[in-house]
Each structure stands twice: as C-alpha cells, then as structure tokens.
Amino acid sequence: MKKRGIIVSLAGVAMLIISFSIAISILQSSGVTNDEFLLPDVLKDAFDQVSDKTQIQPGETAFFSFDASDGTKTLLWGIQVMDPQMGDAVSISISNIYGDDFGKFESNQPVFFETLAITKPDVYNFNVENKGDKPTTIVMMFTKNPDDSKSVINPNSQLGKSLLPLAASGTFFIVGIVTTIVGIIIMIIDYRKNRSSNFV
C-alpha cells in the first residue's frame, strides 16, 4: 500500500504542532497566564492608556476618562470583558466634562473596539454600565491616532513582534489543516485502489 497519504497527513500534523508551538511561545513571552488572556499584555505598546481591571456589579456603572490633547484627530477605544460568560452585556456612553453626548454603544462580545473622531482637545468620559445579571470585570484601552501609531507600523515594536509570529502561526495552522485533509483523501483513494487491485 502506498504511503504517500500518510506522509502528507503527517506533514500537516507537523504544521499544526508548529503553529500551536508558536502561539504558545508568544503568549508565554507576553506574560499571559493560563487563567486569563489580557489583550494589552499580548499587544504591548499598542495602547497609549490601559485601565486597571475593574469589576462592575449588575446595574452599576464604572467611569473612565481619556485626555485627548492637541494633535489627537482620532481616538481608538476598546473594552475587554475578562472571563466572559453567557449573558454578559455592557453599555458604553461617551461624554465630556460639559455633558455633551458623543454616542452610546452596546456590546455583548468579549472584546469591542470603536473609533471616535476628535474635533477639539477635550477630556472624554466613558461610562460603562453592566447590563448583565452577574458581576463583570473589564479593561478599557485607548490609542491616539491609530493610523499614525508607530507601534502599528514598526515591525520592531512589541506589537509588530507579536503580530508577525501570530500571522505565521495562523498560516501554518490553515496550511496544516488543508494538508492533513489532503493526506486523508489520498489515503482513502490509495486504499480503494489497493482494494480494487486485490479483487482483480
């Protein structure tokens, strides 16, 4: 019986192992524990400001602020829910010290990002309300002018050093799955051919 299918499948499995090894290595070097996955820990230098982990009781609101000083044209802000559970939901309303409304957002996702156009320097308040029925712990993240961020465009930054290997890991993972499937198909074809030849 031909062994080409087995060889191709083993190559695919090897690629999958490599992809997992790369991903685990990146997470470990970023200081991620087995208990939690903190996005700012993985994407170090990607954010100008990161809040402390804050627990919000059901129906209560936590307040965060960001000073969009001169030169800030766009503000990328995001929220990560730690240890997400079914039924988690938050509402984020944005205002300034004068009470002007800059939008309200609802999310039931573990991670949520949005951008805010900055027309003038101001201190923006982010009021996060827990709409779920259980306490939730969140982290807020802020980046000024994300399109101009050196951490995004610089491959030598911590962000670049994290994203490039993660992209390679993802590529190995996809190719590994495809290769494994192709190997299995080849094994099935060879098995059927071998079985047919035995009956001839």
Image: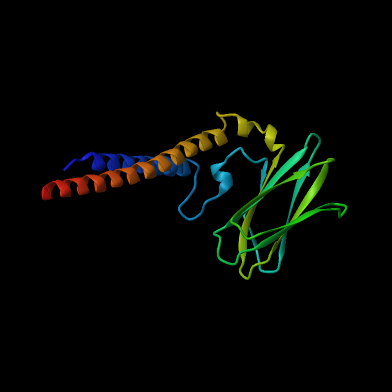
Residue plotted at (27% across, 43% down): 186
Q: In this view, does 83 lie to the left or right of 104?
A: left
Residue plotted at (68% across, 35% down): 147
Q: In which image quadrant can residue 106 be found?
A: bottom right
Residue plotted at (57% across, 36% down): 159
Q: In this view, does 164 lie to the left or right of 115?
A: left
Residue lying furthest front in this view? 200
Q: Give how far across and how far down residue 96 sits, in percent.
A: 83, 51
Residue plotted at (81% across, 46% down): 123
Q: Give how far across and how far down residue 107 sits, in percent.
A: 66, 58
Q: Give how far across and how far down residue 141 sits, in percent.
A: 66, 47
Q: Quadrant of the N terminus?
A: top left
Q: In which image quadrant can residue 62 be found?
A: bottom right
Q: In this view, does 42 lie to the left or right of 1?
A: right
Q: Give how far across and how far down residue 163 sits, in percent.
A: 53, 37
Residue lying furthest right in this view? 98
Total label count?
Answer: 0
Residue lying furthest bottom in this view? 133
Q: Can residue 45 be seen in this view?
A: yes
